[in-house]
Image (cartoon, grey):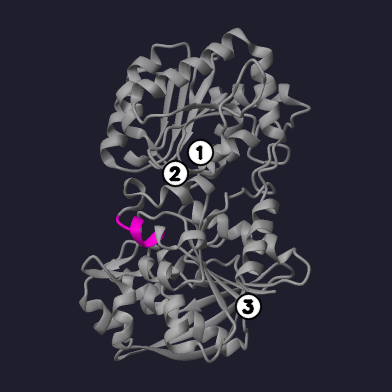
């Protein structure tokens, strides 16, 4: 099967969040399936183009039109052996910038990208069976395919994956005429609630719509979660499905992670204590057997930082230590840093993005906190469990799917959950976990080892995607 993957980011080339992790691992896993030919298409951002460790070759140069604009496309291919083919679409006007997102013309930049991808596949004479698009930045591909490129790819089917419905790619109604340059028939497809909406267009035009967990696929049918698109999404019926993400267990593996003070497995679980002591020393925490609670996260309200702040001082009255790594909204940065200064040796606040430190936090912690208000899938809880760190989560989205509640009597489950989004219920879940940590340590350690044994790789999710591709074909 020939599969084209279209996205705005993919590690290790460029990454701002979980989308980059998914687009690193999923194409690689699909490429391992016998008979598959996988191609990944990305913008040729400045950070990629000027990275001397990324070797590319120019294959072709041509132009595409966005109404009156005639824009250059440089088609580059990654030079490497094995794995899926990786293509970068070069246009310095759009992509040679300091940063990936957040520009005034992001709509135009990614409308160009969507059209240039299809033109690039035509240049390559690559005729995919499935074109798999990810999030709003690639959401106009199904539209341009049917509007202008269908004769080039007569049998291609489209799959669109929503990684986070909150970001839909909205522009004013004038954007349709000024940038997209489509016939008027397509105006209704691309418009919603008085504006052009990239994601809505993909939802109605793709052959299949997926999202990143089974529960999130259900939640998106309801207004509370769908940010205005509940009716559009619910109308897709059986053609809206969920596949829970995996993690790249080659990248996230406590047995081989070079950032750790000591590598360990479930069989050598006692060595995790070496990582804990090293983390305490690195971050200036007091040497202690108290459980380390941690978060590696964006500091944003929907990540549960608001309810964390609500209970923070009460939490720090308990026999625990707290480590947070991440950046985000200024109000949360200031609030957390202020409290951390009141609890030296007990609360370490690290306002930075540091993947190596994140690995050491996953390995050195006992409990991982993920009280998200909503979470399409979540990767951090999967990484934490793979490192033997037990999660406490709000039972929403992918967190509900991946962290069934622990039953100390039967030993079933993977972590601790709370059902309603408020600080007191969150603190109650923490107290249940602390009770087991202090009073039933053998069961606690066994739970951590059980979590480490769960297969969180991309093998099963990739197989589910293959089954979906086959069904849509």
Residue closest to the eye, 46 or 427: 427
Residue at image position (55%, 40%) is 401
| Residue 215 location (% of width, % of height) | 50, 45
Q: Quadrant of residue 405?
A: top right
Residue underneath mark 1: 399
Residue underneath mark 2: 375
The secondary structure type at the circle numbered 1 is helix
The secondary structure type at the circle numbered 3 is loop
Q: On screen, 289 above or below 31?
A: above
Residue closest to the eye, 326 or 469: 469
In the picture, the quarter occupied by the N terminus is bottom right
Give the Cα distance between marks 3 and 1: 32 Å
- Residues in magenta? 228-233
| Residue 413 location (% of width, % of height) | 62, 28
Mark nearer the N terminus (3 vs 2) = 3
Question: Is residue 11 something one can see in this rendering?
Answer: no
| Residue 224 location (% of width, % of height) | 32, 45
- For residue 82, side relative to residue 85 (left or right): right
* Image mark for residue 280: none
- For residue 208, side relative to residue 94 (left or right): right
Residue at image position (32%, 61%) is 102
Residue underneath mark 3: 129
In the picture, the quarter occupied by the C terminus is bottom right
The secondary structure type at the circle numbered 2 is loop
For the residues bearing labels 2 and 1, Cβ distance under 8 angstroms: yes
């Amino acid at each position: 099967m020939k599969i084209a993957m279209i996205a705005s980011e993919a590690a290790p080339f460029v990454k701002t969040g979980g989308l980059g992790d998914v687009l690193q691992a999923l194409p690689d896993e699909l490429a391992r399936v016998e008979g598959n030919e996988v191609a990944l298409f990305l913008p040729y951002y400045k950070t990629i183009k000027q990275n001397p460790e990324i070797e590319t070759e120019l294959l072709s140069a041509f132009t595409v039109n966005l109404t009156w604009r005639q824009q250059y496309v440089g088609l580059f291919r990654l030079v490497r052996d094995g794995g899926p083919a990786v293509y970068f679409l070069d246009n310095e006007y759009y992509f040679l910038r300091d940063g990936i997102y957040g520009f005034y013309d992001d709509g135009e930049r990614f409308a160009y990208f969507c059209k240039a991808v299809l033109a690039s596949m035509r240049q390559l004479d690559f005729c995919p069976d499935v074109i798999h698009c990810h999030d709003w930045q690639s959401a106009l591909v199904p539209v341009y395919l049917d509007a202008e490129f269908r004769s080039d790819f007569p049998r291609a089917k489209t799959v669109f994956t929503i990684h986070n419905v909150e970001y839909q790619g909205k522009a004013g109604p004038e954007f349709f005429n000024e940038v997209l340059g489509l016939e008027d028939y397509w105006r209704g497809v691309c418009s919603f609630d008085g504006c052009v909406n990239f994601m809505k267009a993909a939802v109605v035009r793709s052959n299949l719509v997926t999202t990143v967990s089974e529960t999130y696929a259900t939640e998106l049918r309801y207004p509370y979660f769908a940010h205005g698109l509940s009716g559009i999404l619910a109308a897709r019926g059986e053609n809206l499905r969920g596949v829970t993400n995996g993690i790249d267990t080659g990248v996230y593996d406590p047995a081989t992670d070079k950032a750790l003070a000591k590598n360990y497995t479930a069989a050598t679980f006692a060595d995790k204590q070496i990582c804990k002591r090293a983390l305490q020393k690195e971050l200036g925490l007091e040497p202690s057997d108290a459980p380390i609670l941690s978060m590696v996260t964006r500091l944003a309200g929907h990540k549960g930082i608001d309810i964390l702040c609500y209970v923070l001082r009460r939490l720090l009255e308990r026999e625990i230590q707290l480590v947070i790594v991440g950046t985000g909204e200024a109000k949360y940065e200031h609030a957390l840093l202020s409290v951390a200064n009141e609890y030296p040796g007990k609360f370490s606040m690290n306002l930075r993005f540091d993947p190596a430190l994140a690995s050491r936090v996953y390995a050195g912690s006992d409990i991982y906190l993920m009280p998200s208000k909503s979470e399409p899938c979540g990767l951090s809880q999967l990484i934490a469990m793979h490192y033997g760190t037990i999660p406490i989560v709000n039972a929403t989205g992918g967190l509900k799917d991946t962290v069934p509640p622990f039953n100390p009597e039967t030993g079933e489950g993977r972590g601790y959950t709370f059902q309603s989004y408020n600080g007191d219920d969150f603190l109650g879940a923490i107290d249940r976990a602390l009770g087991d940590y202090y009073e039933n340590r053998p069961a606690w350690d066994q739970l951590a080892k059980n979590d480490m044994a769960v297969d969180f790789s991309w093998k099963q999710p990739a197989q589910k995607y293959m089954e979906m591709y086959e069904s849509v074909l």
